[in-house]
Amino acid sequence: HLVDAHWYQFPPMNPLWHALLGFVIGILGVISVIGNGMVIYIFTSTKNLRTPSNLLVVNLAISDFLMMLAMSPAMVINCYYETWVLGPLFCELYALAGSLFGCGSIWTMTMIAFDRYNVIVKGLSAKPMTVNGALIRILGIWVFSLLWTIAPMFGWNRYVPEGNMTACGTDYLNKDMFSRSYILIYSIFVYFLPLFLIIYSYFFIIQAVAAHEKNMREQAKKMNVASLRSAENQSTSAECKLASSSHDHFPMVHGVDSIPSHQLRGYFRDDQDQPSLHDLGLSL
């Protein structure tokens, strides 16, 4: 009863795709669990890294770690059997976990962007983030995420199997306006709003770093030297390092932008839309 009637008009996916997807998800799961596990261990065991800003980085690693730990094994099992075999309750829990940790990761990246904006753009005039401030932000992220992700469990939309029958997500094919309102509002507050805030923050970060570098070059030219940085100190400033490290998150920002299309296409779907690799967007 959880499977939308729309999917019954299509034949099952090719077993080769199930095998390939199961293999890829399994490899990504192992890499993610090990990689994020190492980040969590290093940042929590090294005293010098226990800074307020790094608490947000650890929170991001924990969220990504738990997402793949919770979702990757189930995905691999279902790909092996070529259908959802874990029952309706686990389907809801699987989709809830994906939504919860996805929302947590996205808003954590937004808070990281705000912190870098505060340090780089505002500079010495900025009020530094404290440990309590970071913990309050982290608590707010998880409360906000939990409220959004438990809503389908109480009737505002629902969690159902995807068209490929190996993953579960929100019911974006439901034509009921009450159900559609969840998809629309959720997409705005969980994807589009943080995407806008991240782009806004990094736009001014890049602008500030570029202006700083321009001033450095102009000063060096006036002093008739190649660079104001001495040979003994070729490392960039802490602010520039922060801006540089921000590039690590841009692939994830692309994911923030692309995921809503998976849900919103239910508003404009053609009745001939077939289950495809695109249906695995939330799983990845």
Image (tube, rainbow, N blue to C red):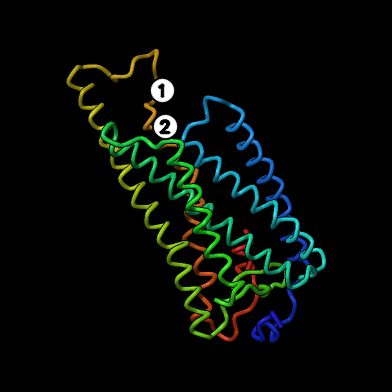
Q: Residue 71, relative to residue 49: is it above or below? A: below
Quarter of the view holding residue 237: top left
Residue at the outermost right position: 81
- Spot occupied by residue 184 in the image (x, y as percentages of width and height): 46, 73
Residue at the outermost top position: 232
Decide which of 55, 162 is in the foreground and name it. Answer: 55
- Spot occupied by residue 173 in the image (x, y as percentages of width and height): 57, 80
Quarter in which the N terminus is drawn: bottom right
Kindly identify the residue that appears in the image at 68 percent across and 50 percent down: 28
Q: Secondary structure at mark 2?
A: helix
- Spot occupied by residue 48 in the image (x, y as percentages of width and height): 52, 25
Q: Secondary structure at mark 1?
A: loop
Circles 2 and 1 in contact, beta carbons < 8 Å? yes
Decide which of 41, 281 is in the foreground and name it. Answer: 41
Q: Is residue 272 left or right of residue 244?
A: right
Quarter in which the C terminus is drawn: bottom right
Q: Is residue 75 left or right of residue 41?
A: right
The disc at residue 34 is none
Question: Can you identify the residue that label 1 sits on?
Answer: 235
